[in-house]
Amino acid sequence: MPSCIVCHLSIDESTDSIFKCESGHTVHKFCLAEWLMHSHSCPLCSEPYPKSLIDQFKDYKEKKEQEEKAALEKELEKESIKKMEEVAEKIVFLKLIESIENLIEEEKYNEAIDKLLDEYNENAINDGNLNVLFLLGKANFLKGRFDLAINFLFKLVKIRFDYPDGFLYLGKAYERIGLKDKAQWAYDRISERK
Ligand SMILES: [Zn+2]
Ligand SMILES: [Zn+2]
């Protein structure tokens, strides 16, 4: 029983369609259909297959290429939907931050802090969450809760050293509770970055 040079399994000539290159290398019909997607020569001897044989698989190749194209388009569509969702989410988040900054400006610190705590995620270290952490520090500082402000701001600058405003409010909070050395340490971190 001959074997297929692509899949190496035996070919049952009574049931399988069999194809041969000019040197007589045998191959399953399905295996040849797949192989012709990549090359028009015998995988073993590199002898080009006759055009008449290749033409027999033309429809298969076209169908397969169309399927691949459709799958790719579907994938791209999925990706663009995901991107759009991400942008929408970001806009909602930026609006929320803006509304919280307004509350802080209007000296509605408790309201701002409640909203920030709803949004705060202890385990996330993305820009959005660090922004929330900063505003938690700032709002608590302005409210006069210097201990809480230090708590939040220290967490922030531990994650992101390059956060001058974080160090600024951290310094101010240390200053207000009389820790001059620590305040100076925080202020020094700001000038280092400039
Ligand atoms: Zn095969
Ligand atoms: Zn061959």
Image (spheres, rainbow, N blue to C red):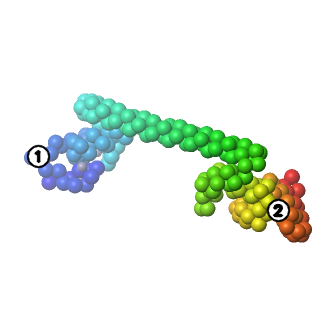
Q: Position of residue 63 (x, y in %)?
A: 30, 33
* Circle number at residue 37: none
Q: Which residue is mark 1?
A: 15
Q: Position of residue 174 (x, y in %)?
A: 84, 65
Residue 137 or residue 70, whichever sits in front:
137
Q: CA distance from mark 1 to mark 2?
A: 85 Å
Residue at x 71%, y 56% (from the top left corner): 136
Q: Name the element at disc 1.
A: loop
- Depicted 125 relative to depicted 80: above or below: below
Q: Is residue 94 visible?
A: no
Q: Position of residue 128 (x, y in %)?
A: 65, 50
Q: Position of residue 12 (x, y in %)?
A: 13, 50
Instruction: Answer with the quarter of the image where residue 122 lies.
Output: bottom right
Residue at mark 1: C-beta within 8 A of ligand 1: no
Residue 178 or residue 189, whichever sits in front:
178
The amino acid type, in three-letter code, at marker 2 is Ala
Q: Name the element at disc 2.
A: helix
